[in-house]
Amino acid sequence: MWAIISTSKNLKFFDLKGTTAKEIEGLSYFVKHKGHVPEILFEHNFAVTTLIEHGVPLFINKADAKSEAVALNLTGFKYLKLTPTIIKF
């Protein structure tokens, strides 16, 4: 699964209702600096459930996420890969 995130200092997600990313309340994460590329660490099952509850769209593959980001003319974004083992609705 993939989410579209902002490239700002804090982790923010695009909800595709506008062109501004938002922080998600209750989503805890840790940034591990690995060379020049930081790695975002959190519990993926909880993260996916929380994102769905907050209306953040998740995409099955990166190409779908890219297509949506391009269609909305988003700027300053990246893609975040999520690998949940279970999703709770």
Image (cartoon, helix red, strand yellow):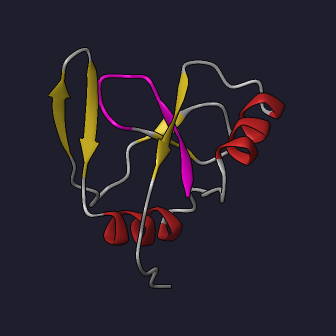
In the drawing, does residue 78 fall left or right of residue 38? right
Residue 57 vs residue 17, the one in the foreground: 57
Please determine whether, in this image, residue 61 is positioned above or below residue 80.
below
User: The magenta stretch spans which residues?
Assistant: 1-11
User: Residue shown at 44%/66% (left/top)?
Assistant: 48
User: Residue shown at 60%/48% (left/top)?
Assistant: 15
Question: Where's residue 81, x and y in %?
Answer: 47, 48
Q: Residue furthest front?
A: 35
Question: Where's residue 16, x and y in %?
Answer: 68, 45
- Magenta run includes residue 39: no
Question: Where's residue 26, x and y in %?
Answer: 27, 61
Residue 39 vs residue 73, the one in the foreground: 39
Q: Residue furthest right?
A: 71
Circle count: 0
**Rendered-image quadrant of the N terminus:** bottom right
User: Residue shown at 37%/52% (left/top)?
Assistant: 24
Q: Residue furthest top?
A: 36
Please determine whether, in this image, residue 89 is positioned above or below residue 45.
below
Splitting the image into 4 quarters, where does residue 7 fall?
A: top left
Question: Where's residue 61, x and y in %?
Answer: 66, 52
Please determine whether, in this image, residue 76 is positioned above or below residue 80.
above
Splitting the image into 4 quarters, where does residue 49 fall?
A: bottom left
In the drawing, does residue 71 fall left or right of residue 88? right
User: Residue shown at 65%/31% (left/top)?
Assistant: 19
